[in-house]
Image (tube, rainbow, N blue to C red):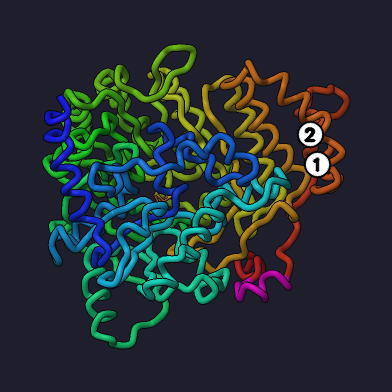
Amino acid sequence: MAGGLWLAVFPYAFLGREKSDRKGVRFVLTASAAEMATFGNSWMLAMMSTFPEALVRPFAWRYLKPQDMPDGTARFAPYGLRKIESVLVEAYGEDSVAVVHPYNLEKFVGADTEAVLVSTMDPLGLAYVSTTYNPLIGFGGEALNRTEFVRLMRHRVFEKWRVKKVVGGFGVWQIRDAGLQEKLGIDLLVAGECEEWIVPILEKMRSGQPLPKYIRTVKLKEFTRVPLIRHAAGFGAVEITRGCGRRCQFCSPDFRTKYDFPLQHIMSEVEVNVRNGCDSAFLVTEDIFLYGSDARFNPNPSRLKQLLGAIAGHKGVSEIAISHASLVPVLVAPDLLDEITPLIIDKSHYRKGGKRFVGVDVGIESGSVRLMKRYMNGKAYPLRIEDWPEIVVQGTGVFNDHLWYPMYTFILGLPGETEEDVLATLELFDRLKGSVVFYVPLLFVPLEEAILRSAARSSLERVSELHWEFLLGCWDRNLRTWAEDINPIVRLASFFALPYMRHIHGAGITRSLVRFIGLPLVKPARSASWKRCEPDYCAQKGRTTLERYLQ
Ligand code: SF4
């Protein structure tokens, strides 16, 4: 019996020694524990790492622990890190690369390690959700994402072995803008798509040639060289499309060339995830309806059916989730959801009242035609942006009729936003009453690659009574629609928090919070205006002021 057990574990014991000897692996890839975590395969739950550490760590700690393969490498890792792993394995060989959980770094970094490559989406908690909700909550410390990232940057292996620290991913702009690159000891920040550039960068670094501290890569044009992932990505992520093309000015994915990955490529990655222990498929796309679409954004139902049918038909996949979608295609192709919903609904990740539904993130952004025209003219294409509020109302109806219950994001504080713009958003919100939607209002953040990258970031300090009405109105409706069981507890807690909230956010929150609590004492605040950007703040950040956008 004991001999049989030894035979069973022997290959793993051997592998463990091979990958993690004291000399270290040449290239070690990792991410912060918060970004490596798979949160029980729920990317919705993963959002908790954007909230204050003191509030979420009691729930998150169990997800932050390493999930290892027998050789000590990570069982799951962010999809982008898996892509870089594949590129490096092709260039340097399997033994030169290890993707590991940050708590295991010491086992893999050693004298032979040339660089530790770190991937990050939100290193300092400065992305949309953290920017909006952490100041709103007002206590609990830094975002968990931030504390775990800083912890990783200060890991003793960097000091001990003097290895290069290279950080890439969507979130690197946060480190540069916060001026923390040097303080965190980061040798190189790499922004943008890396598949084509990471090997030349590492070679240059190795040969001692001078490199800038911050590299922005040129966007990828030749996708046939994008390798397949070799091991499982967190959540069973698999990239369906890249880029978009609708040209929204606040958006960074739009900068990427629009590309549909071939079905065979996608299915091979689904297979990799399944084979490595992940039975879900999380379809990563800026808009699922872009898959196979033409240059006028008309969807391609037959290609979509082929794609979704193949993934849902894979016997190793028991759950499917789609990251993003848009509204217009379901109006220009009225039969689209009739055709594709039956393919995926039985494997959909989401349930409401025990019944499965298709959940998907859709960017609505604003109810103001003026702002949509100015910054997101292509959002409605091939329909007219002038009809945006009507498109949203009609599209929501089509979604709900087919058991698609979307998560709608709205952006408050876009440059040049006026009182009329916020009122238009509130009006649209009123028209959506009765729909099954999860609302996520967010404050505007100028993203690195976006056209509006130089605009001033909005902040809770400058929100008006109207904004509070929308912010709290959204959460009021979310509680009623999605969490009726905890609704009374949240209202009661908000009642006791009222003086504190008033203290940190000012009198502007009072009326909306009183209504949120459910005290029918006040009318909604439908008159206020967005305060202008603080010149000091803009100057300090080296950003232009709102006035530039008001010309
Ligand atoms: S539609 Fe979405 S992904 Fe496309 S450019 Fe606009 S915000 Fe970006």
Q: Of the numbered discs in the image, which one, if any, rests on residue 501? A: 1
Residue bearing mark 2:
513
The mark nearer the N terminus, 2 or 1, is 1
Camera-side residue: 126 or 547? Answer: 126
Q: CA distance from mark 2 to mark 1?
A: 9 Å
* Residue at image coords 22%, 60%: 97
Residue type, mark 2 in image: Leu
Relative to 94, is 177 on the left or the right? Answer: right
Q: Quadrant of residue 8?
A: top left
Which is nearer the eye, 227 or 428?
A: 227
Disc 1 secondary structure class = helix
Marks 2,1: beta carbons within 8 A: yes
Which SS type dominates the magenta stretch? helix
Residue furthest out toward the bottom: 209
Please tell me which residue is depicted at 73% across the width and 67% down the height of the picture.
534
| Numbered circle sitting on residue 370 | none
Residue 360 inside the magenta-drawn segment: no
Q: Amino acid at mark 1?
A: Met
Give the mark count: 2
Q: Position of residue 56 (x, y in %)?
A: 59, 39
Question: What secondary structure is marked by label 2?
Answer: helix
Determine the residue located farthest toward the top in the rendered image: 354
Q: Can residue 466 be seen here?
A: yes
Q: Report the residue at 44% width, 53% height from top.
A: 32
Q: Which residues are magenta?
A: 535-544
Residue name at image x 78 percent, y 24 percent: 492
- Residue 540 lies in the magenta stretch: yes
Vertical placement of residue 6 versus 146, above or below? above
